[in-house]
Image (tube, helix red, strand yellow):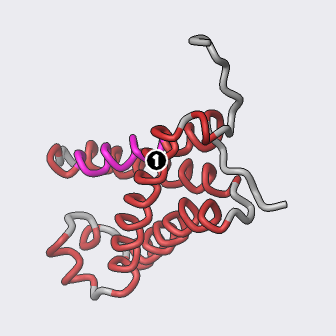
Amino acid sequence: MGNTITAPGDASRRPGLNMVLWAMQGLLFLAFGALGLMSLTMPIPKLADLLTWPGAVPELLTRGIGAVEVAGAMGVFLPALVRMQPWITSYAAMGLTTVMICAVGYHMMLFQGKAMLPSIILGVIAGYVAWGRETVLPIKGRG
């Protein structure tokens, strides 16, 4: 029948959406993992050459944001991948969305229009993953 109702979490009936969500989760894992590791390990002057904000905020804040980004990157991908506590995925994506909302606010405050675009894009992707994995297509845990 044409009007089939799909139960939430039924990835077999929505393979396209499942693939899109996995691709977005992979993108978030790579982007926030790389940015977070850079923020945690690179010297601040080098990091400030690549990104606008690290030289303008205290080093501890830069390192803290890096730690949050690495944790979010792992949380948005790994629990779903191994299917252990997969609910963490949507919450990690919500956290990354919050980080990007803060980043957009920071760039708006300093009138850095071009710097807002990556934050907006990553924030929208993270928000979509949070919504998709929480309500539409949650990952089922083991057992």
Q: Which residue is mark 1?
A: 19
The image quadrant where one finds the N terminus is top right
Give the magenta part as a residue range. 116-128
Determine whether 84 is above or below 59 in the image.
above
Query: In this rendering, would 93 be left or right of 134?
Result: left
Residue under the image location 64 percent in, 64 percent down = 79
Residue under the image location 36 percent in, 52 percent down = 103
Q: Quadrant of residue 13?
A: top right
Q: Position of residue 116 (x, y in %)?
A: 24, 47
Residue under the image location 66 percent in, 50 percent down = 139
Q: Position of residue 91 (x, y in %)?
A: 63, 51
Query: In this rendering, would 92 be left or right of 59?
Result: right
- Where disc 1 sits, the SS reads helix
Q: Position of residue 19 (x, y in %)?
A: 46, 47
Tell me if residue 126 is in the magenta stretch: yes
Residue under the image location 76 percent in, 57 percent down = 141
Residue in the foreground of this view, choosing between 121 and 143? 143
How packed is label 1: few (under 14 Cα within 10 Å), some, or many (20 or more)?
A: few
